[in-house]
Amino acid sequence: MTAAVSIQFDFPAYLEAARLRVEAALADSLGPEKPESLREAMRYSLLAGGKRLRPILCLAACELAGCDSELAMPTGIALEMIHTMSLIHDDLPAMDNDDLRRGRPTNHKVYGEAKAILAGDALLTRAFEMVALRSPGVPAERLLAVVGELSLAAGAPGLVGGQVVDLECEGKDVDLDTLEYIHLHKTGALLRACVLSGALVGGASEALQAALVSYARGIGLAFQIIDDILDVTASSEVLGKTAGKDLTADKTTYPKLLGLEQSRQRAATLVAEAKQALAPWGDGAGDGKLAPLLALADYITSRDR
Ligand code: GRG
C-alpha cells in the first residue's frame, strides 16, 4: 500500500508559503558582492523565479527530522545557488546553447559568455559559503556533513559527471541504463542532496537518512521523466525554456525509448515507491510532518512546467 497524503493538508497553500519564504531568503542572500556587474549577473539568474523545489525539499526534510526548518534555510539557498549555476552553465553555447530560461533571455545572452561563466562560478562558491559561514545555530559537525554532500552532488560524482556523459551521448543511441545513469547524476544527485542535507541539518537518524535517499532516487528519476515528457508536450511559453530541445539536440529521452504512456507509468511507479520508502515516518492518520514530502512527490508527476 502506498503512503497517503492527508485530505486536511493544503498542499497549494503549503507550497506557496514555502516558495515565498525561499524567495525572501534568496533576495537577502546576495550581499555586497563586488564588482557590482558580477553581483547583477548573479542576481539576474538567482532571482528569476523557478519553482524553488530544491530548497523546499530541503526544508521539508529538516522538519521531518524534527527540527525548525528555518535552520536549514541557508542550506536550501545554497542548493538553489548550485542549481541556478548549473542552469547558467548548461545554457552556454558550449553546452546546450539555449536562449531562454525561466521565461527570460539566458544569462550569457544578457551578460556575455565570460560573465555568465563567472557568475556561475561565484554562485557555486557562494553556496558553500552559505553553509559554512552563514548557517547560525547549526552544529559544526552537521554543517561539515552538509558540505560533503553538496560537494558530491555538484562534482564529478554528481552533476558534472552526469553532464559529461550526457554531452558524450548526444547523437548516439543510448540504452535505458545509460539514460538512467545520466539522469541520476545530472538531476537526481542534487535532489538527493536536498533531502539529505535538510535531514543532516535536522539531526535525522541513519534510518531516516537512508529512507530519504530511496525517496530521492524515485523522485529524481520521475522528475526527469516528466521533464522529458514536458519537452515534447508543453510550449516554450509555459515551460519558460525552449520546448522540443531534446529532439533538436538528438538526445535520447524516456519518451523516445519507452513512448509517452509507458514513460508516464514509469514516473507514477517511481513516485509510489518513493512515497513508500518514507511510509514508516507518517503518523498513520494525516501523515503529519511527512505530508509535504508525499505531496511534493505527487507534484513532480502532476506539474505542467
Ligand atoms: C554543478 C559544478 C557544477 C557544474 C554544472 C551544466 C552542468 C554542470 C550540469 C547540468 C545540470 C542540469 C542543467 C540538469 C537539468 C536539471 C533540471 C531538470 C533542471 C530543471 O529544473 P526545474 O524544473 O527548474 O526545477 P526551475 O527553473 O523551476 O528551478
Image: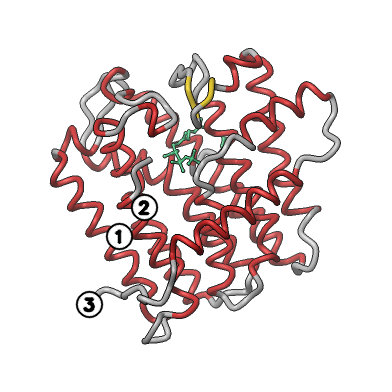
Q: In this rendering, which labeled residue sits more in front, label 3 or label 2?
A: 2
On whether ligand 1 comes within 8 Å of the CB at mark 1, the answer is no
Q: CA distance from mark 3 to mark 2?
A: 20 Å
Q: For mark 1, what is the residue?
A: 271
Point out the image quarter for the N terminus. bottom left
Element under disc 3: loop
Q: Is residue 40 above or below residue 25?
A: above
Q: For mark 2, what is the residue?
A: 300
Q: Is residue 102 above or below residue 288?
A: above
Q: For mark 3, what is the residue?
A: 1
Query: How many discs mark residues in the rendered view?
Result: 3
Q: Position of residue 11 (x, y in %)?
A: 44, 64
Q: Are marks 1 and 2 in contact (CB under 8 Å)?
A: yes
Point out the image quarter for the C terminus. top left
The disc, 3 or 2, on the residue closer to the chain's N-terminal end is 3
Q: Quadrant of residue 291?
A: bottom left
Of residues 12 and 218, the one nearer the viewer is: 12
Identity of the amino acid at label 3? Met
Q: CA distance from mark 1 to mark 2?
A: 8 Å
The disc, 1 or 2, on the residue closer to the chain's N-terminal end is 1
Identity of the amino acid at label 2? Ile
Q: In this rendering, which labeled residue sits more in front, label 1 or label 2?
A: 2
Q: Position of residue 269 (x, y in %)?
A: 22, 59
User: Who's the residue at 76% across and 69% down the image?
Assistant: 139
* Residue 63, disc: none
Element under disc 1: helix
Q: Is residue 194 above or below residue 10?
A: above
The disc, 3 or 1, on the residue closer to the chain's N-terminal end is 3
- The crowd level at tag 3 (other Cα within 10 Å; few <14, some 14-19, many 20+) is few
Q: Are marks 3 and 2 in contact (CB under 8 Å)?
A: no
